[in-house]
Structure formats: C-alpha cells, structure tokens
Image: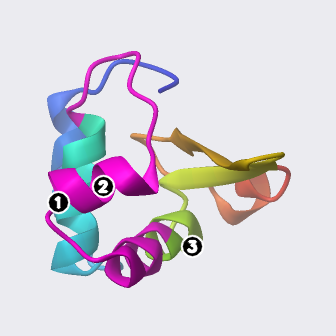
Amino acid sequence: MSHAVTAADLQRAASDTRLTLEARAMLFYVMTRPADYRMSVADLMAGCNARKDRVYSRVTELIATGYVTRKLIRRGAEYTIHPVPLSPVEGMGA
C-alpha cells in the first residue's frame, strides 16, 4: 500500500455507497493486512470465504471505484490497494 491506513480511511470506505457490502468487507480485509501484504485472488478466496467468481466480481468493483489498481504481468496480475480511492483520471495509467 502507498501509505498507512488511518481510521479516516476506514470510515471513508465504510460509508462509500458505491460499494456493495461484500466489496466493503473485502476492502477492509485488504486494508488491515500487514504493510508487506500482496493481494491475490487465492488469498481473498480464503480470507473472505468467497468463490473465485465472487472475488473477481468484487475486485472489479474495487477497481472501478478507484480503491484497487491492476497491472497485468507475465503470470497474472499485480494489485495495488489505495486506502484513498484514486480519481478516474489517476487510475487510467495503472
């Protein structure tokens, strides 16, 4: 993550009505992991007790709202979590 998560970041995420409750729960899960945490679909499936299709759906929701950016790499994707959502313009290059 780019910076430490604050109580204000968690409050902002909790009150973001653009997100479903499932997406908020997943966001809380990733925002409260250790600083060296690397988000993966397999970890989200286990940590959030969700099926693969549900995880991908919620990750897509988090990307659309600016909380997560995805960079495609040779063997999959690398995800970056943003406690403060990026604006659509900021997220375009990621």
- The residue carrying mark 1 is 48
**Separation (CA) of disc 1 from disc 3:** 20 Å
Indicate the position of residue 30 as horizontal and vertical percent values: 30, 42
Extent of the magenta region: 32-59
- The residue carrying mark 3 is 64
Q: Amino acid at mark 2?
A: Leu
Of tags 1 and 3, the one toward the viewer is: 1
* Closest to the observer, 51 or 93: 51
On the rendered structure, is 55 left or right of 21? right
What residue lies at 26% left-to-right and 78% top-to-bottom? 17
- Mark 2 element type: helix
- The residue carrying mark 2 is 44
Q: Amino acid at mark 3?
A: Ala
**Separation (CA) of disc 2 from disc 3:** 18 Å
Q: Is residue 33 above or below residue 86?
A: above
10 Å crowding of disc 2: few (<14), some (14-19), many (20+): many
Q: Is residue 39 above or below residue 85?
A: above
- Mark 1 element type: loop
Q: Amino acid at mark 1?
A: Cys
* Closest to the observer, 72 or 15: 72
Closer to the chain start, of discs 1 and 3, is 1
